[in-house]
Amino acid sequence: MNEQTTVAVVPATMTLTGITKNYDGVAALTGVDLTIRPGEVHALLGENGAGKSTLMGVAAGAVTPDAGSIAVGENTYDHLTPAQARALGIAIVHQHPAVMPDMTVGENIRVAVPAAVLRRDGDVEKTMRAMLADVGCAAHLQDRVESLSIAQKHLLELAKALVVEPSLLILDEPTAPLGPESVNLLFDRVRAVAAGGTAVVYITHRLAEVRALANRVTVLRDGTVRGGGETADISDDELLALIVGRKLDSTFPPKVTTDDKDEPAIVVEGLSGRGFHDVSFTARRGEIIGISGIAGNGQSALLRALAGLEPFSGTVGIGPEAYGSKRLRHRCGYLPADRHREGLMMSLSVRENAALSALRLFTRGPLLSSRDEAEAVAGQLRSLAVKTPSQQTMISALSGGNQQKVVLARALLSAPAILVADDPTQGVDVGARSEIYRILREIAAEGVPVVIASSDAKELEGLCDRVVVMSRGAVVQTVEGDAITEEALIHAAVRATGHRREEAAAGHGSTRLRRFLLGDYAPVIILALVMLGLGAYVYATNDRYLSAFNITSVMTSCAALGFIALGQTVALLVGGIDLSVGPLAGFMVVVGSFFLNDGRSAAAAVVGLLLMLLTGAGTGAVNGTLIRYAKFTPVAATLATYIALQGLSFLLRDSPGGNIGSGVTGVVTTQVGPVPLSFVVMVLVAVALEFGLRRSRVGLRVRAVGSSEESARRVAVKVTGTVIGAYMACSALVFLGAIVLLAQLGIGDPAQGVGYTLSSITAVILGGTSLLGGRGTFIGTLLGAGLIVQVLNATVFLDLTQTWQYFFQGALVVVAAVVYSRVRGAGRSPL
Amino acid sequence: MTSSSDATANSRRTISRGLVTVLIALVGLAVLGWLTAPSSMSHGALLGMLPFASVLAIAALGQTLVVMQGGIDLSIAGTISLTVVIITHEAYGDNARVLPAAALALAAAIAAGLLNGILVGRFGLNAIVATLGTNALLYAAVLGVSGGTPRETTSLMARVAGGSTLGIPNAVYFAVLATAITTVVIKKTVAGRRFEAVGASALAAWASGLKVDRFRGGAYVGATLLYWLAGFLLAGIVNKPTAYEGDSYVLASVAAVVLGGTSLLGGRGSLVASALAALFLTQLQQYVLARGDTYAVQTLVQAAALTVGVALYTINWKRLRSRHRSRALPASA
C-alpha cells in the first residue's frame, strides 16, 4: 500500500504526548502517546476501562489531563477546553450523547453548531433537515430530544459532528445502539470524510469494524498503549493478545459437574418484558448461567426483570416455588452494571452499604445491635477478602473491585434466593476479578442460582456452565458445558443478528398535537383558559369587575410581581432558584427612597436608580459566584443573600421613611387609557425575553445549561458564565419590579418585598416552568403572575375572606404542578 | 493492606464533621460572649433564650428529616402557625380543652405531612412546589381558625411549655427528648437506617428492594410531628402568639440544618448537629442583642454565619457535589 508511506510524511492532525490522568488516585491513563494523521481512520481498541474514552475526552477538551501535551497543527497545549477544541476543528461523538433532553432537535443543533455553519446554504432549517437526512436520522426538528430513541440521539450527535466538517472526528463506539442500515450509512460517511482529508479516531471493541474501516490501530490496556500499527500488518490474534494480554483461563475456578437427574434450581419460562421477549432457560443446582450477546440486546433488561426491578410476564421458578416481580425484588441479590448509581450509596460507609439489606437480622427488640451488625459485616467482608481500612470508611474511598465486593457482601448478607449480576467485573482490577469469580462459584455451589451478563464472552466462557445468547431481546441459542467457547458465543450472537432491529420509534406519532402537548406552551393555553373562565364568572356576579379602576389596579399589582417572576424564571431556567428576589426588591426600594424624593435633583434620581441597579448586579454576582465557585446549592446561596439583604434594608432604615417623589410615582403610574404604562412595559419585556429564549444563542445556552450541565459543557457552552449571568439577569429584572414597587409603596419600608420570593416562585410554577431547569416560558410566567393577582382580586369581588385567597393559591399550585407533571410523564423522575 | 478483621474493633461511630463544627462554634460563641458581652451569658439571658432555641431545635430536626431525602419543607411555617392557632383558639382560656385542641392540631399537622408526602413521594413533585402549595392551604386553615387575630394562651399551656423544672425551662427537656428519640429512630432502627440509605441514593435503595417513595414521603410526616411539637411549645411560651408565628422558622430551620452539616442534596443527616446549630443561631441573636446592636446587624451576622458555615462544608464535599451534578454521565474511564 503505497499511500501509507505518503500518509506518514504528512504532518499529524493531532499528537498526544505523555498523557496522564488520575481519578481519585486511580490511574486512568499513564504516559499515553498517540499520533493521528489526516485522512486516516485510526481505530482505538481496548477493553472496558482501558482508557479509550478518557483519552479522547482529553483530545476533545472534555477531560483535563494531569500531565502531557496536546499538539494540534503548530500549537502545543497543556489541555484544551471544549471551545478551543471546537475552534480547532475537533468534533466528537460521545458514547453517551451530549444532548439536552429538554430542548428540541433543532435547538440542540443550533446550540452546538456555529451559526455560520448552519447559514452556509442560506436557510438554517433546510441545512438542519439536510444534516439529519444525511445520517439517516428520522427525527423531526421540533421533537423534544427527550422523546427520541437512543439510536436517534446518536445519529443526531453524528449529524452535529459531521456538519462542521471537522479536521479531526472522534467516534466513541458509534455502532453500539444502531441498526444495520444506520451502521452501513455510518461506515459510508466515515469513509467519505476520511477520503476528504479528515482524521478519524474510531473507538470500538469490535475487531470486525476495525477490519472494515481502519487504516491504523492502537490498542490501550489499563491506561497505557500496548501496541498498534497498520491494520494490514497486524492479525486478529495479535490484536486480541494486545487487548487481553493475559491467559484468562488461569483465573477461573473449576466448573461443576452436575447430574442430569438433579432437580432444576431455576426454571424461567416465557419471560417477556420491555426490551426482551419469550426468554426461557433452566439450570441445575450449582450452575452459573451466563447471558451473552452484543451489548444492548436485552441482556440488562432481562436481568433487571429477574431482579424484580421491571415488570414481566411469564414465570420464574426458583427451587419449587414461583416468584413474582415483587418477591424477586426482595429476595434477589442484584449487582447492577452501574455500580455508582444503582449499587452503592457513595456517601455512606462500607458497613452501612453492606448491612442495608440484612438489617432485620441485627435487631434486638426494636433497636439495631451495633455489635451484631459489625460482626456479621466483618465476617462477610473477611470471607470476600474486601480490602478496607475499616467498616467506617466511606465506600467512595475503596477501589472498584472492593466496591463491587461490598455490593456482593450486601447481597450475600441478605441470604438471597437468586443472585443476578450485570457485568460484575467491569472496572474491577485483575486480581479482584478472579476473587469475584471464585465467590460467584461458591455462591452457586451453595444452591443459589447465579445469573451473570457480561459483554466479555471470554469471561462467560471461563465462568459459566450454561450460556443463553440473546439477540434483539430473544434467545437465539443456549450453549452448555464444553461447547461454551468465546468463538461459539460470539458466533451465535453475530450470526443471528449482526445488529439490533431498527427502532420504529422514528414515526411514533410525532404529530403536531402531540408535540404541542409535550411542548412548553401547553400551560400557557391552560392558564389563559382558566383566567378567561374565572374572569367571566366574576364578571357575571359583579359587573364592576371590569371597571377601569379595577383593571388599572389589577394590572399595576401584576406589573411588580410580573417583573420579579420573570427574573425568577431566568434563575429556574438554568436549573437554579433565587430566594433572594423578594428582599432584593425591598432593599432596592429602600435604597431608592434616599434619592428619589420630592425636591431632589434629576441627578440624584439618576444616581439612585444606578445604585439600585448596581445592588442588583452585585447580588446576582454574589449568588452566582457562591453557587459556581463556592459550590453552594442555589437554595443555600440565595438563602444567605436573602438574610443579608434583609439585614441591609434594616441597616439603612430601621423604620419606614423617605417618601418617594411624586415625579417618580407619576412616571411609573402613567396610564394609557385604563392600562398602566408599567404593565405594558412588563408585557413587552416578557415578550422580548421569550423571543430571546427561543431565538437567540444566549437563550439557547441558558436552557442548555439548565437541561444538562454536562452536555452543555461538552458542546462548548460556558456554564459558569451562563449561570452567573442568569442570576445577574434575574436581579436586573427584579430592579424593574422594584421601580414599580417604589411607586406602589411610596415610601422606603425595610419590611416590604419579602413576600415576593414565594409569590414569584408560585407564578413561575403556574406558568409551567420546570424546577429542574431547562424548560419553561416567560409568557407562562406572565400569565402565572396574572392569575395570582386575578385570584386575589376576584376574592374581593366575590366577598370571600382571606382564607379563600390562601386556599386558591395553594390549590392552584398543587393542581398545576400535578397536572403538568402528569402531562409530561414521569420521564424526568429519578426512578 | 488492613484486613477486614480489624474492622470489628473499630466499630465506634465516628463523630460527624457537622457536630464538631457546631460544637466549636458554640464554644467560640460562649467564650466571645463572656469576653465581650457578658450580659448575653447571664443566667437570665440564657433562661430567656433557651425556650426559643428549643423550639427552633425541634423545628430544625423536622427540617433535617426532609433535607436528608433531598427535599426542603416550606410548609413548616403553616404547620407551626396552624398548631399555634388551633391550640390558642380552641382552648381559649379553658385548660380542660388544651388536650383535645392539641390532638386536633396534631391531626391537622399529620394531614399536611401526608399531603406533602403524597405529592413528593407518589407524584414526584419538586419539594419546593409541593410544600409551597401545602403551606398556602395551611394558611387558609390558619385564617379560617383564627381570623388572623391573636389570642392569649391558657395558664396550663404557659405552665407546661413556658415553665421551668429544676431551674431549667421545660422546653429544653422537650427538645432534648425529641433530639434523642429522633436520633435513635434514624440511627438505631431498621426503618431509620433504610431512610438514610434512600436519602443517600434513591436509585441504589430501590435496586436493593426498598420502597423509596414511602421513605421520601414519610420524611414529611415525621417532620410534621416535630413541627407540631414546636408549635405546641410555642403556643405556651409566647403569651399571645400571632397567627403567623411559624413564618420565622422557614429560613431559620433551613439555616440550622445547613449549619449542622446536612447537605441540601440529601444523604446522611446530623440530627444532633442540627439541634445544636439551632441553639447556636439563637444564642448568636442574643449575643448581638446584648452588644446593643440593631436587628439589622443581627440579621447580617446570621447571614455571615450561614455563609461561612456552608463554605466550610462545601470545600470538603466538593467531590460529592460534582458527582451529583454529573450524575447523567457515568465515569468515562
Image (spheres, helix red, strand yellow):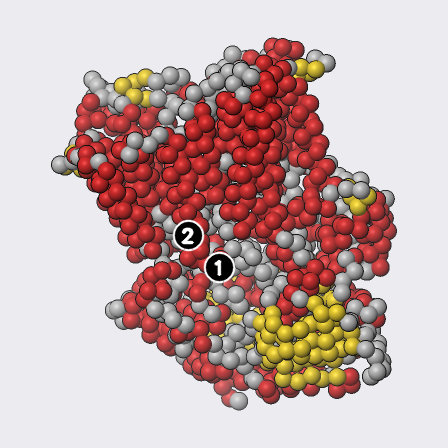
For badge 1, the amino acid type reads Gly
Say left or right for A670 vs A312. Answer: left
Say left or right for B218 vs B167. Answer: left
Q: Is residue A340 visible?
A: no
Quarter of image, res A516: bottom left
Residue A277: x and y in percent read 59, 77
For badge 2, the amino acid type reads Val
Residue A620: x and y in percent read 40, 38
Q: CA distance from mark 2 to mark 1?
A: 14 Å
Query: Which residue is label 2 attached to?
Result: A819
Residue depicted at 39% across the width and 20% down the height = A652
Q: Nearer the viewer, residue A694 or A309?
A: A309
Residue depicted at 51% across the width and 80% down the height = A501
> The C terminus of chain A lies in which quarter of the figure?
bottom right
Query: Which residue is label 1 attached to?
Result: A827
Say left or right for B164 vs A609. Answer: right
Report if the CB atoms under discs 2 and 1 are less than 8 Å apart: no
Chain assignment, label 2: A
Q: Earlier in the sequence, mark 2 or mark 1?
A: 2
Q: Nearer the viewer, residue A802 or A443?
A: A802
| Disc ID at residue A576 | none
Q: Is residue A356 visible?
A: yes
Residue depicted at 50% across the width and 29% down the height = B82
Chain assignment, label 1: A
Instruction: Check the image and report above or below for A226 versus A326.
Output: below
Mark whose residue sits in front, 2 or 1: 2
